[in-house]
Image: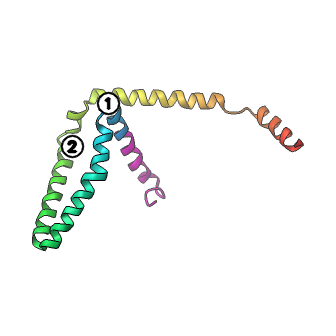
Amino acid sequence: CIWFPFPPMRAVPLNASRTLGMYAAHLRATPAVYLLTVFVALPGLGLALSAVFDASVVAGVFVLFFVLAALGWFVYWWVRMEGCYRVLSKEDRDRVNEQLAKAEADLLGFVNQTSPQKEDVDSVDVIASAI
């Protein structure tokens, strides 16, 4: 995939998935809204826009401009006007991030505790060579 050769670009889908997971953990409707948006609404919008372009190029350009302007306004509202905090408050975000960091630390600690010791690996090699 084009995202993974450059390490800074790897953060884009990872942060997007963390954010989506955070919203899904807080708002039960998030997965359904995501699925309907990504697999029904956006393809339907693309199909409708294609039909408008088939009918009239001028109307298609106008509708495309309107859709891009609406998308730009939404991104501006979400990022600059902090609309994201109206959906999930800063305190809730911080609490979820702390819980995630604690769970990740517990998981990594558990993995490190259960990793095989050198003696165990050596005994497995001896048994495997005997077979």
Give the CA separation, mark 1 to mark 2: 18 Å
Q: Earlier in the sequence, mark 1 or mark 2?
A: 1
Residue placed furthest toward the right: 130
Q: Is residue 73 left or right of residue 127?
A: left
Q: Position of residue 33 (x, y in %)?
A: 27, 42
Quadrant (top left, top right, bottom left, bottom right) of the C terminus: top right
Label 2, on which residue? 78
Q: Position of residue 82 (x, y in %)?
A: 20, 39
Q: Quadrant of residue 62?
A: bottom left
Q: Could you say which is closer to the camera, residue 131 or residue 88?
A: 131
Please name the residue shown 71% across and 33% down the image: 116
Q: Position of residue 30 (x, y in %)?
A: 30, 38
User: Tag 2: residue type?
Assistant: Trp
Residue at screen point 27% across, 48% down: 37
Which residues are the magenta region?
Answer: 1-19
Specify the principal SS of the magenta part. helix
- From the image, state whether disc 1 or disc 2 is nearer to you: 1
Query: Are there few (<14), some (14-19), or many (20+) residues within 10 Å of tag 2?
Result: some
Secondary structure under badge 2?
helix
Residue ID for mark 1: 26
